[in-house]
Image (spheres, rainbow, N blue to C red):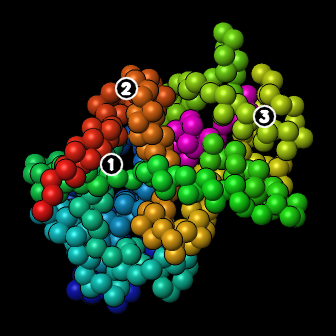
Amino acid sequence: MLTNNSKPTTILPFESMQLPAHLDGNQGSNRYDSKHCQISANTDWQAIQCWLNEFYDSPQTLRNYRKEAERLLLWAINQRQKALSDLGREDFQLYQEFLANPQPSQIWCGPRAERGSLHWRPFKGPLSQGSQRQGLIIINALFSYLVDAGYLAGNPLSLIRRRKRKLQPQADQAISQQRYLDHKTWQLLKIHLNQQPQETPKQINHYQRNQFLFHLLYLMAPRVSEVSSHSMNSFRLYRGQWWWFVLGKGEKQGKVPVGDEMLAALMLYRTHLGLTELPEEDDSSPLLRSINGTKSISANMVYRQVKSVVKEAAETIRLDNPIQAATLEKASTHWFRHTSVTHGDDAGIELKYLTRSARHEKIETTAIYQHAEDDKWHKAWQKLKY
């Protein structure tokens, strides 16, 4: 148990901690009048849970938001000996510096480990500028929610006006745009997918599911939560053409055209599962199945399956294609969403249609994935010789 003067010797996941009353937030200096509180929360952790519950239908968002909230809470308790609801403007300036260099690193940083392990740490290491900014954006959203809910009196993070400028968003935006597979890397991954073994029933099941999954990721640009949450009848015939009807981020409905290749991949997967080639309107069975084809799988399982495939592909091509292997190692499910939009632009699909298929609210969001002009510029510059 911490006292006001104690320093941590190890960092535990929040659920493993026993907090003294002065650190649980029940009497935090930034607490608003409890009579006006609109959520059922007496402590900071309970208030955070109320906020997280708003994202129960977006597993990936929920995990990311929980991670950032827990990091701040553990820092406040262990480094500042304050409750979350005691934090002020100066604390957040210190926290921003801490994210760039979590110290003491031996108790804050380490490789990935199970939460129950003695080796678990909140950080792998110092956060990049983009991750710092993203973390503060999430924390700002948390505090804004708690203010709106009448749990906190104010949001001290909103007072730090220059936080975004200090984190150099323009430089980080260039990095974020690179999270896609170039055409050569994508072709190498497809070769790997087509060469996966099909000798045993289990291997055949893996092969067929991966073929469908990567067609879906590349041709439909879904978010990972959409892959796991949708049913077969989300693919529907509408006015003589096939569309994928999606309930996406923020519960917004959209639709994406289903091309011939995607429709063929769907038909092959359904045939493998012993279903009719095309789904009926009442087919509410899971779109992507467990390996035995009977149950749905979670967004986390989809993410892990994709990571497993791309890492395996990276090892296969490393000797002859080390650059592409290094790219594949870093790729995740969301990279394929970026890859889909980028390659769509390269193929000449109009920006307005790319925006609709990606279901971006603003056309400017889609536009950052347009790289054709950069490619022409780079090729032209090769004419300059030493």
Q: Earlier in the sequence, mark 2 or mark 3?
A: 3
Q: Are marks 2 and 3 in contact (CB under 8 Å)?
A: no
**Residue where numbered disc 2 is placed:** 351
Q: Amino acid at mark 1?
A: Gln
Magenta range: 216-234
Relative side of 376 to 233, left or right: left
What is the crowding at mark 1: few (fewer than 14 residues within 10 Å), some, or many (at least 20)? some
Q: CA distance from mark 2 to mark 1?
A: 16 Å
- Residue 264 in picture, x, y percent from top left: 73, 33
In the rendered image, which quarter is residue 355 located in? Answer: top left
| Residue in the foreground of this view, choosing between 319 and 239 | 319
**Residue where numbered disc 3 is placed:** 267
Going 87% across and 31% down the picture, which residue do you hit?
A: 276
**Residue where numbered disc 1 is placed:** 177
Q: Earlier in the sequence, mark 1 or mark 3?
A: 1
Mark 1: secondary structure: helix
Image quadrant occupied by the N terminus: bottom left
What is the crowding at mark 2: few (fewer than 14 residues within 10 Å), some, or many (at least 20)? some
The magenta stretch spans residue 222: yes
Going 56% across and 30% down the picture, which residue do you hit?
A: 247
Q: Amino acid at mark 3?
A: Met
| Residue in the foreground of this view, choosing between 287 and 133 | 287
Q: Pick out the residue farthest to the top.
A: 239
Magenta residues, dominant SS class: helix
